[in-house]
Image: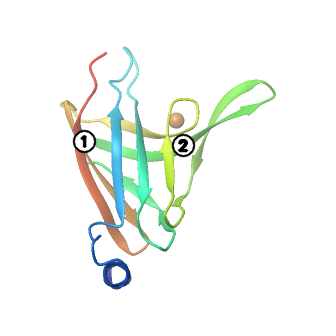
Amino acid sequence: MRKLALLALIVTAACSSESGPPLVISDLEITRPMPGASMSAGYFLLENRSAEAITITRVDSPQFGRVEVHETILENDVSKMRRLDALTIPANGSVRLERGGKHLMLMRPADDVSSVELGFFTSEGLVLSTSTRVAER
Ligand SMILES: [Cu+2]
């Protein structure tokens, strides 16, 4: 957290008209689990507005028992998912989580998941928190 605060100071000094959080989320969509399934998927765009790469090492949500970052890969013409230990957003760059690509997998839902809160952590702590309504199908 201390490093991020310092980073924010540097960014502010370098570009005084622009301050604000280093990591910005948009286009956030959490799907409702398919009937009989207990997993939801999350899609969004993460923008890093700082001059240093940001590596997300953990995502959590009070509405789910477990949240993982997955990547869909094609192996011998079979679509598979694998878990990613980290998600790096390059300096002044962005990463999109989308259908058929990297995505968030939300497991073990609570009884009420009509509204979902998400926290994104680096090894140094929380860098972004957000919430959204779950998409109607
Ligand atoms: Cu997945």
Q: Earlier in the sequence, mark 1 or mark 2?
A: 1
Of the 4 image quadrants, the one containing the C terminus is top left
As drawn, 18 above or below 37? below
Per the image, the residue denoted by label 2 is 70
In percent of width and height, residue 16 lies at 29, 78
Q: Is residue 93 left or right of residue 40?
A: right
Q: Are marks 1 and 2 in contact (CB under 8 Å)?
A: no
What x and y, as percent, mark residue 42? 40, 37
Give me the residue at 34% from left, 39% from top: 28
Query: Which structural element holds mark 1?
Result: loop
Q: Hey, what amino acid is under mark 1?
A: Gln
- The three-letter amino acid code for the residue at tag 2 is His
Asked if 78 appears above or below 108 in the picture, the reply is: above
**Who's the residue at 38% across and 45% down the image?**
66
Rendered residue at 26%/67% (across/down): 20
Disc 2 element:
strand
Label 2 residue near ligand 1, CB within 8 Å: yes
- The N terminus - image quarter: bottom left
Few, some or many residues within 10 Å of mark 2 (<14, 14–19, 20+): many
Label 1 or label 2, whichever lies nearer to me, is: 2
Question: Could you say which disc has been placed on residue 88 in the image?
Answer: none
Q: Position of residue 7 (x, y in %)?
A: 38, 81
Q: Residues within 10 Å of mark 1 (few under 14, many from 20)?
A: many
Query: How far apart, in angstroms, are the residues tagged by discs 1 and 2?
Result: 19 Å
Residue drawn where x is 51% and y is 50% of the image:
95
Nearest the eye: 1 or 89: 89
Figure quadrant of residue 24: bottom left
Provide the residue designation for mark 1.
Answer: 63
Residue 115 place in picture, x, y as percent: 19, 35
